[in-house]
């Protein structure tokens, strides 16, 4: 089957009807487009496990704050179509905003607690916007399997928790973070970094590694591990730290003493660009 572009909910439902009734596995990779090596990894994994592979491309206005980069977010539909063709995607679902939200959404999905820390306080409404659009996509496409990147670890946990709390019949598959050779996590926003900013950007990964190293050396106090990471970030004056936290990987609550696996996660700003990254650390 060649890659087909579908833009309406009625059409994608119609296309998937016969696939579902013949008990084939539908895999979904939700994206905001501007596809890159991170998305490629999700798509490749999905391709191995699904009979029918759907990639959704939708820049979801609900998950952007009023001061965020919704209008400036990269959109490159032609390149994305070629990208999906090369990876043997069956269907691209790329609805317009009016198709997904013909009327203002009065219904939203809120996943409490896991959004209290990390990106949550800095992006009010963001995770509710994500959970709401993913719930809609799950209802429209009804995939048996859906693929999300660990790069957005808090988002991944929010989706996993929504699925278990609401008994949604989908298996969430977590895919490891894809990095550039210098450690920078691949992201659609990296293309907006100036050459100088791009040179600074891997500092976030190095900071996370410093915390990892401290824990590997036996540091059990998260305050101390966090200090080691912050010391790395302080080396570059052009970097503004939004947060650097050590949390439990399940509910994303701050941890004081290491007694089991933790996730160290950070967000920094370099110029106008916000970068996030995280590492799972098992002591
Ligand atoms: P986005 O288009 O940024 O909304 O991302 C779509 C999906 O790709 C999300 O599940 C992300 O976590 C995942 N993703 C983005 N960047 C990476 C990366 N560098 N490695 C792995 N997954 C990623």
Image (cartoon, rainbow, N blue to C red):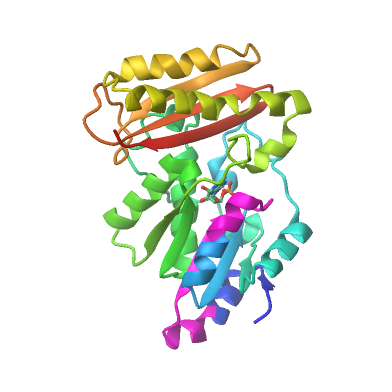
Residue at 27%, 18% (x, y): give it: 221
Look at the image and give the residue range highlighted in magenta.
16-42
Position of 153 with respect to 183 (left or right) is left
Q: Is residue 279 magenta?
A: no
- Residue 135's place in the image compared with 113, above or below, is below
- Residue 126, horizontal then vertical, whole percent: 49, 39
Whether residue 106 is visible to the viewer of this picture, yes or no, is no
Expressed as whole percent of the image width and height from the top left, the position of residue 106 reads: 46, 49
Where's residue 34, x and y in %? 69, 50
How many circles with numbers are drawn on the protein?
Answer: 0
Quadrant of the snapshot with the N terminus: bottom right
Of the pair 64 and 261, the residue shown nearer to us: 261
The percent coordinates of residue 188 (x first, y second) are 66, 43
Task: Residue at the far left: name it.
Answer: 259
Q: Is residue 6 left or right of residue 23?
A: right
Q: Quadrant of the C terminus?
A: top left
In this view, the residue in front, 216 or 141, is 216
Residue at the image point whose x is 33% and y is 35% from the top: 252
Is 119 displayed left or right of 77 in the figure?
left
Q: Quadrant of residue 58?
A: bottom right
Q: Is residue 26 a member of the stretch shown in magenta?
A: yes
Do we see residue 236 in this rendering? yes
Question: In percent of the image, x 36 and y 27: which residue is there?
Answer: 246
Q: Nearer the viewer, residue 193 or 283?
A: 283
């Amino acid at each position: 089957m060649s890659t087909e572009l579908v833009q309406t909910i009625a059409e994608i439902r119609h296309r998937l009807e016969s696939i579902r009734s013949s008990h084939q596995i539908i895999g979904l990779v939700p994206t905001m487009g501007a596809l890159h090596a991170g998305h490629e990894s999700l798509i490749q994994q999905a391709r191995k496990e699904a009979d029918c592979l759907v990639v959704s491309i939708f820049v979801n206005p609900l998950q952007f704050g009023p001061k965020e980069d919704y209008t400036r977010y990269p959109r490159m539909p032609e390149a994305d179509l070629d990208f999906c063709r090369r990876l043997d995607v069956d269907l691209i679902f790329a609805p317009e905003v009016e198709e997904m939200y013909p009327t203002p959404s009065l219904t939203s999905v809120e996943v409490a607690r896991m959004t209290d820390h990390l990106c949550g306080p800095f992006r009010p409404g963001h995770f509710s916007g994500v959970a709401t659009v993913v719930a809609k996509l799950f209802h429209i496409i009804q995939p048996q399997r859906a693929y999300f990147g660990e790069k957005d670890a808090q988002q991944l946990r929010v989706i996993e928790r929504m699925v278990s709390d609401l008994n949604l019949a989908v298996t969430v598959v977590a895919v490891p973070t894809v990095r550039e050779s210098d450690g920078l996590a691949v992201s659609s926003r990296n293309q907006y970094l100036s050459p100088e900013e791009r040179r600074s950007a891997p500092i976030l990964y190095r900071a996370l590694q410093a915390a990892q190293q401290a824990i590997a050396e036996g540091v059990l106090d998260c305050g101390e591990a966090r200090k080691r990471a912050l010391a790395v970030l302080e080396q570059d004056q052009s970097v503004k730290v939004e947060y650097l936290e050590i949390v439990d990987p399940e509910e994303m609550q701050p941890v004081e003493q290491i007694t089991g696996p933790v996730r160290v996660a950070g967000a920094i700003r370099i110029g106008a660009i916000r970068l996030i990254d995280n590492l799972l650390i098992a002591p």
